[in-house]
Image (cartoon, grey):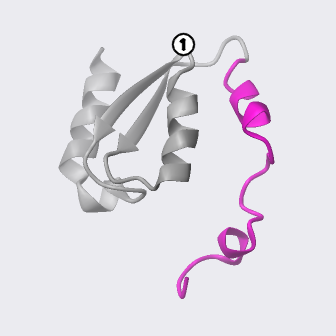
Amino acid sequence: ARFATAAFVTGELDLVREQEDFLALFAKPGLPPILALIGSATPRKSRAEMEALAALPQVQAERIPGSLAAHEEYPEAVAAAVRKFMTA
């Protein structure tokens, strides 16, 4: 946590407190397609949140290697998933 932001460390990062409220943000009409990248080594609690988001009909999920910083760990896999999503 040495380099973590105060908002992350104190738990004040999220604007919503309940998963239900978070998912409701993505149920609004007129939103563009949504891509959720889920890392294979994502911690259990974070993965549960990501899988709940991925279960929404307007969300396309891609499973990629990595964890919460997959963009740093596996940038090629992230780029490939984004490229596939953007050209679909």
Question: Percent position (x, y) of residue 3?
Answer: 53, 83
Question: Percent position (x, y) of residue 69?
Answer: 39, 59
- Quadrant for residue 78, please give it: top left
Quadrant showing the C terminus:
top left
Question: Percent position (x, y) of residue 29?
Answer: 71, 11
Question: Percent position (x, y) of residue 65?
Answer: 25, 48
**Which residue position holds label 1?**
57
Q: Is residue 28 magenta?
A: no
Q: Is residue 49 above or below residue 33?
A: below
Residue drawn at the location 54% of the way across and 88% of the way down: 2
Q: In the image, 45: left or right of 30? A: left
Residue farthest along the bottom direction in this orientation: 2
Nearer to the camera, 44 or 55: 44
Residue drawn at the location 41% of the way across and 52% of the way down: 42
- Quadrant for residue 66, please give it: bottom left
Q: In the image, 80: left or right of 20? A: left
Tell me the kind of residue under disc 1: Pro
Residue drawn at the location 58% of the way across and 41% of the way down: 49
SS type, badge 1? loop
Q: In the image, 66: left or right of 35? A: left
Q: Is residue 57 above or below residue 72?
A: above
Magenta stretch, residue numbers: 1-27
Q: Residues within 10 Å of mark 1 (few under 14, many from 20)?
A: few
